[in-house]
Image (cartoon, grey):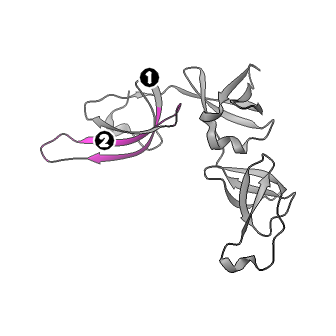
Amino acid sequence: MLTMNDLKSGSHIELNGEPYEVLTKEFIKCAQRRPVMACKLRNLISGKVLKYTFQQSDTIAEADLEKMQAQYLYKDAENFYFMDNESYEQFSLPVSLIDEKGKFFIEGAQITILKFKEKPINILLPIKMTIKVISEPEAVRGNTASGSVTKEVIIETGAKIKTPLFIKEGEKIIVDTRDGSYVGRATE
């Protein structure tokens, strides 16, 4: 069990039977009142963010989270399908849960799955991934006058990424999975 003072940004707690990640915390001390910890929490199942205030006397349960490796198989209209690397069982996660992270999945790639009470609930992507460019528009001379010196390329997962003009089809680039931005060229 945790106390109010044990909470840190990035901590995983269980609240009302669901896992939450502490995004921010702020210690508030008012005159003639007990101090409290105001936190922003993100539900790891639904992704919703809520504000919650912990009192000094509160005890907080740590979330029983487990990580496992799985292989990404394929996607249909409603689900992403994975295979557990240890038991070889297949399972799915809804598209609504994975959201924007799914645009970085390459078939056969190893993905870290977050489990809560033995049930897969979310995925953890590395911050940076190396992905191949499969299509890029031809750069037009003189387009730099507007100050925008980027073009939109299509990567092997089908997602579109803005890159500098010098990136060519067939090159591998490094992409930041948090916001889908170009980081640099991949060196092999």
**Could you tell me what secondary structure mostly forms the magenta stretch?**
strand
Residue 75, placed above or below residue 30: above
Q: Is residue 163 left or right of residue 42?
A: right
| Rendered location of residue 179, percent (x, y) | 61, 53
Q: Quadrant of residue 117?
A: top right
Q: Earlier in the sequence, mark 2 or mark 1?
A: 1
Provide the residue designation for mark 1. 17
Residue 157, placed above or below residue 111: below
Could you tell me which residue is drawn at 80 percent across and 37 percent down? 107
Could you tell me which residue is drawn at 76 percent across and 51 percent down? 130
Q: Which residues are magenta?
A: 20-47
Residue 132, placed above or below residue 20: below
Could you tell me which residue is drawn at 71 percent across and 44 percent down? 103
Q: Are marks 2 and 1 in contact (CB under 8 Å)?
A: no
The answer to if 39 sits in the magenta stretch is: yes
Which quadrant is the C terminus positioned in? bottom right
Q: Say which amino acid is labelled 2.
A: Met
Measured Cα–Cα span from mark 2 to mark 1: 20 Å
The answer to if 9 sits in the magenta stretch is: no
Decide if residue 123 is in sight here. Answer: no
Provide the residue designation for mark 2. 37
Q: Is residue 144 left or right of residue 51?
A: right
Give residue 138's mark: none
Label 2: few (<14), some or many (≥20) within 10 Å? some
